[in-house]
Image (cartoon, rainbow, N blue to C red):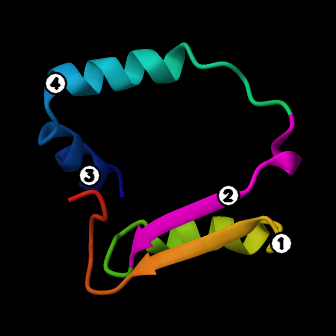
């Protein structure tokens, strides 16, 4: 999983990756997630699909939706 993630990061524009990491590191803490609706999105061929499904299994089904795109590895491409 780490090797897969590392190879994926090497393909990302380094300027955009730096901006994303800076925004992530400076984000504010979300204290109460109970009031938020959550949409989890993954491709059914993604190596992370099982992890997303595991997260979904732990979530409140009244507040959480799972969108699984057929024949897709990376839903952002």
Q: Which of labels 4 and 3 is toward the front?
A: 4
Residue at the (58%, 74%) spot, across then down: 66
Rendered position, 53 above or below 1? below
Q: What crowding class fits label 3: few (fewer than 14 Cα within 10 Å), some (14-19), or many (20 or more)?
A: few
Q: Which of labels 3 and 2 is toward the front?
A: 2
Check disc 3 and report the residue beneath it. 3
Name the one closer to the observer, 4 or 58: 58
At numbered mark 1, what does the secondary structure look like: helix, strand or loop? loop
Mark pair 2, 4: CA separation: 29 Å
Check disc 2 and report the residue beneath it. 38
Which mark is first along the chain, 4 or 2? Answer: 4
Q: Which mark is residue 14?
A: 4
Where residue 27 appears, as percent x and y from the top left, is 59, 19
Find out whether residue 37 is within the magenta segment: yes
Check disc 1 and report the residue beneath it. 62
Q: Which of labels 1 and 4 is toward the front?
A: 1
Where residue 13 appears, as percent x and y from the top left, is 13, 31
Which mark is first along the chain, 1 or 2? Answer: 2
Rendered position, 61 above or below 19? below
């Amino acid at each position: 999983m780490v090797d897969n993630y590392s190879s994926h990061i090497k393909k990302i524009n380094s300027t955009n990756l730096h901006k994303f990491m800076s925004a992530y590191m400076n984000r504010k803490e979300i204290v109460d997630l109970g009031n938020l609706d959550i949409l989890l999105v993954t491709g059914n061929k993604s190596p992370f699909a099982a992890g997303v499904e595991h997260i979904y299994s732990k979530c409140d089904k009244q507040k959480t939706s799972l969108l699984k795109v057929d024949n897709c590895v990376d839903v952002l491409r």
